[in-house]
Amino acid sequence: MATRAPDRPAATTTGRASHRPPRRFLSHRFDMKVSPYAYVAPFLVLFCAFGVFPLVYTAWVSLHEWTLLSDVHRFIGLDNFATLLGDGYFWNATFNTLSIGVLSTVPQLVMAIWLASLLNRPLRAQTFFRITLLLPNVTSVVAVVVIFSQLFGRDFGLINWVLSWFGVDGVAWSEGALSSHVALSVMIMWRWTGYNALIFLAAMQAVPRELYEAATLDGASPYTQLRRITIPMIRPTIIFVVIVSTIGAMQIIAEPLLFGAGTNGGNIVTGGPDRQFQTLALYVYERGFVNFDFGYASAASWVMFAFVVVAAAVNYLFISRSRGDLT
C-alpha cells in the first residue's frame, strides 16, 4: 500500500509576514532615533539664526569697506585686519580689557570659593544667606554702576572719605588707568561673586561627607580640608566657572560704558577722555555704531572672538593641569 507523502507547508504570505517586525516596533524605533533631534531642533534653529549666521555674515562684512555712508560695499580682503593690527586704540582697548579682566576675575573666584566653603558648613538661616548672595546679580547693572560711581566719586565719594582716615588724598578714580580699572573690577566682583559662589556650593554639596569626617579625625584644619579635599573634588566646576568668567571678562561693556557717562563730556564710548578704561566691546561699539564703519568693526569683532577663544583655552589648560589648590 503506497504511503502518502506529507503535505508541504504552503508558502503563504503569512510565513513571510511572521519575520516582518510589527508596526509598533517600527514606531518605537523611529521615536527613539528621531525624537531626540526633534527635542533639540528648536535650540539648533535659534542657534543657527542668532549665532552661526551673524558670525558668518560678520566675517563677510569684515572683508568689505562697509559703511552707512555709501550703498556700495567694496571688497578689500584683509585690509581691515591689517589696519586694525596697527591701530593703537585697538591695542589700548585690548590691554584695558585684560587688565580689568584679571583684576576682577581672580579675586572674584577666590572669594566665591571661600564663601561657598562657609555656606557648605552647618549654619543657621542657610537659605537666607544663599538668597542674599544672588541679590547683587539680579540688581540692574545701571543701578550698580550709578551707586558705585557715587562711592568712587573724587570729591564726595565714600571710598575717598574712608581713605582720608589713613592720610590718603582724594583719588580721581575715573581719571587714571589703574584707578579706573580697580573701580570697575570692584563693580564686577560685587555683581558676580555671589553667583559663582552658589555654583561652587552646588558642586561642594556633592562631595562625600565621609572625606571631611576622616580628615577631621586626622586633625586636618578647615583650610587644609578646603585645599586638599574640596578644591580637587570640584575641579571640573572650577574649570567651567573660570572659562565662563573669562569669556564674560573679555566682553565687558555695560560697566565702562555707564562709568564713563559723567567723565567724558557726553562721549561715553571712548572710556574716558584718554581712553583709559575703554574695553574691546566698547571699541567695537564705537567703530560700528558711532563711526558707522561696520567693516572695520566686524574685523575687530573677529579678532576679539579669537582673543576670547585663546584666553579660554589658556585658562582651561592651566586649571586642568594644576593640582587643584590655591597655593
Image (spheres, rainbow, N blue to C red):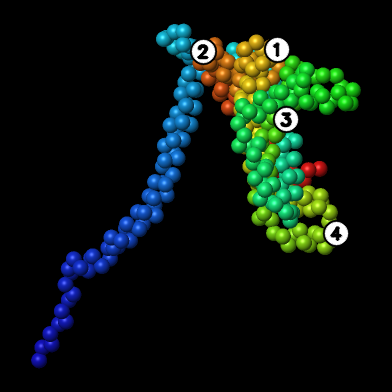
Element type where label 1 sits in the image: loop
Whether tag 3 and tag 4 are in contact, CB under 8 A, the answer is no
The residue furthest top is 69
Of 305 and 203, which appears nearest the observer? 203
The numbered dot on residue 292 is 2
Crowd rating for badge 2 (residues with CA inside 10 Å; few <14, some 14–19, many 20+): some
Asked if residue 281 is positioned above or below residue 267 in the image, the reply reads below
Residue 274's disc number: 1
Check disc 3 and report its element: helix, strand or loop. helix
Is residue 21 something that shows in the picture?
yes
214 up-or-down from 96: above or below:
below
Q: Disc 1 residue type?
A: Asp
User: Which residue, given by chain and number where applicable, does mark 4 sit on?
Assistant: 219
Whether pointer 2 and pointer 3 mark residues with C-beta atoms closer than 8 Å, the reply is no
Distance from disc 1 to disc 4, alpha carbons, whole Å, reads: 55 Å
Q: Amino acid at mark 4?
A: Gly
Q: Amino acid at mark 3?
A: Val
Label 3 or label 4, whichever lies nearer to me, is 3
Q: CA distance from mark 2 to mark 3?
A: 32 Å
Residue to which mark 3 is pinned: 186
